[in-house]
Amino acid sequence: MQLFKPKYTSLSDEELMKSLSKGNQGAFDELYNRFYGQLLGYFKNMLWGDREKAEDMVHDIFAKIIKNPAYFDTDRSFRTWLFSVASNMCKNEYKKQAVRKNTSTGVEEHRGISSNSNVLSEVQDFQFQEAFEKSLANMDEKHREVFALRHLDGLSMKEIADVMQINEGTVKSRLFYATKFLAEKLKVYNPVLNY
């Protein structure tokens, strides 16, 4: 009989998956807490800013994990594996959307401006954020995915290469192109160019 519950926060992701495969609910809760925000951001960036669709995808991926934790190969990095699964889910969603002829949800997120701060600064931040999201959404999926994995989710070049099953040189090339594309689209917000 175990007198103390294991301290899940000190376990690696891979150790948590091993514990989960033995039916330990606490291990799942810790993985969920660690990755929910990252996955939500990833899916939102990859799925045209659709928060509702992103939340559905996050719940789907965690449902897959809890339903069949043995699906994870414990010799791999959990994070890399998780984003590989997420990437494949996005590709499947792109295919579904292509069949539906890219119909729009028509739902836009409402953002407010607080009255107790610098309104001009908030308006500029809001405009930049909208322009950034629009530019990211207009980028082709392979470049958008590399940019999101690197700059929004913090994966290394090697992890991105593993997730996307491409070599690191291709990752660097796509990242360069994505950064150049965004810099061009957002140059109006660059104070150096607008001095």
Image: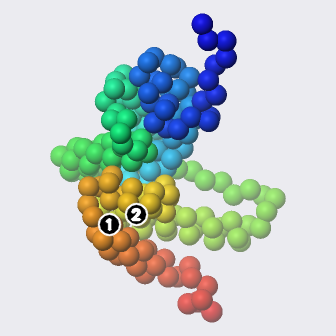
What secondary structure is marked by label 1? helix
State yes or no: discs 1 and 2 in contact (Cβ < 8 Å).
yes
**Horizontal arrangement in the rendering, residue 161 relative to residue 34 (left or right):** left
Image point (52%, 82%), residue name: 188
Among the two numbered marks 1 and 2 on one chain, the one whose residue lies closer to the N terminus: 2
Residue 55 on image: x %, y %: 46, 38
**Residue at x 51%, y 47% (from the top left corner):** 38
Q: Nearer the viewer, residue 60 or 114?
A: 60
Label 1: which residue?
A: 168
Q: Which residue is tagged 2? A: 157
**Residue 73 visible (yes or no):** yes
**In-front residue for pair 124/140:** 140
Is residue 51 visible to us here? no
In the image shown, does 106 or 186 lie closer to the viewer? 186
Where residue 85 sits, quadrant-wise, is top left
User: Which residue appears at 64% of the width and 19% of the height?
Assistant: 5
Instruction: Identify the residue at the far top of this view.
Output: 1
Q: Is label 2 in a helix, a strand or a loop? A: helix
Q: Looking at the figure, which quarter contains the C terminus?
A: bottom right
Vertical arrangement, residue 95 with respect to residue 192, above or below: above
